[in-house]
Image (cartoon, helix red, strand yellow):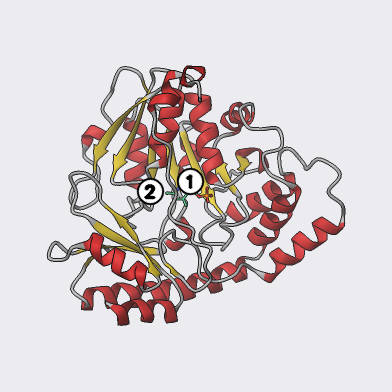
Amino acid sequence: MLCTSMFRDAIQKMTGYTPGEQPRLKKVIKLNTNENPYPPSPKVVEAIKQAAAAGLQKYPDPMAGAFRSRAAEVLQKDLPAITPDWILCGNGSDDLLTIITRAIVGEGGVVRYPSPSYILYKTLADIQGATVEVIDYQSDWTLAEDFTRPLEGLRLAFLANPNSPSGTTLSPAEVARLAAALPCPIVVDEAYVDFAETNCLALVADNPRVIVTRTLSKSYGLAGLRFGYCVAQPQVIQQLAKVKDSYNCDALSIAAATAAIDDQAWLADNLAKVLATRERLAAGMRSKGFQVTESEANFVWCTDPSRDLRSLYETLKESGVLVRYMPYPGWPEGIRVSVGTDDQVEALLAML
Ligand SMILES: *Cc1c(COP(=O)(O)O)cnc(C)c1O
């Protein structure tokens, strides 16, 4: 029998994070975890083959220098001051969120984040033995002053921007204001930012307590690769780097991610397709009677008080279409639908 007392109290008490379902059946129309419906740039696959052929017997570059150099060039348009030492890479952006939390939040600290939002923030706080302070969004998905108020023990704030499940975005000016008013560092989780009109990268230059995280999982079609990065001032990156695994990104993923961020033409082409389909999906869901929040991400948040959305989710699942049913306590339940291909969206709408 398992001896539970071998674990820290904080671990025994917490419930682990449950990711969205990942069915292995090919036939399922998968619109539940915001993956890109299109395969990544062919240059990514080529780069993986080349890196594999070059031999895997050596450890990879611990800081993923090739990616950092290319990323710094690409990101210069939004953050002119950026150089490679403003960037830290990770095994998906979840790895960066973990590194940041471990580096900043200790036992008994407080982590603040809005709700409804990404629930991994709670898991990360739980692992540290920290407590969480959940600030409800207002009904228009903005944040009231309570998000920035001083609080004893407050160590870190998270803000997904664009937010999930709403797909809504706070403006860079608003996020700058929140960051300046907060008595602690803020992580601006930009997992979906490539689908949005604006981003908060420039804020990093003015405020050392702003850390922006990004991922290649969504907009670059590389959820299976596991690669993300964060951007912060160099002295912040240096501290975070102490906490990461020595080789947190493998040689194949570094090569692939470098090729991916290098292919901005692929990204532009992909975004054009996804954004066009997002508008079709939103319009289609509205025509079926749902309230659909205006989205700046690759999914739409749909509510309808007159429907039983849990049973709708179940029925769709039985018919081979997976969406994400999300009941947040105190909020109208909703379904979050990822932007698939046009054919997938048509299939969903036909079923509805
Ligand atoms: C998908 C997602 C991430 C994590 O992405 P990785 O696959 O770990 O890079 C982080 N934050 C939010 C809000 C997400 O939706």
Residue 181 is drawn in which quadrant? top left
The residue to which callout 2 is attached is 172
Residue 312 in sight here: yes
Residue 185 visible to the viewer: no
**In the rendered image, which quarter is residue 178 located in?**
top left
Q: Position of residue 319 (x, y in %)?
A: 36, 74
CB at mark 2 closer than 8 A to ligand 1? no
Q: Are marks 2 and 1 in contact (CB under 8 Å)?
A: yes
Query: Is residue 51 depicted above or below 107 in this figure?
Result: below
Q: Position of residue 218 (x, y in %)?
A: 51, 59
Numbered disc 1: secondary structure: loop
Say left or right for 138 vs 206.
Answer: left
User: Which amino acid is tagged 1?
Assistant: Ala
Q: Residue at x 49, y 61 (%)?
A: 23
User: Which secondary structure, mark 2?
Assistant: helix
- Residue 246 drawn above or below residue 339: above
The x and y percentages for residue 10 are 42, 22
Q: Position of residue 240 (x, y in %)?
A: 58, 30
Dot 2 or dot 1, earlier in sequence: 2
Q: Measured along the vertical axis of the image, is residue 167 above or below residue 27?
A: above
Nearer to us in this view, 296 or 254: 254
Residue at screen point 34% across, 78% down: 280
Left or right? Give the position of 208 relative to 74.
left
Q: Amino acid at mark 2?
A: Pro
Residue 202 is marked as 1
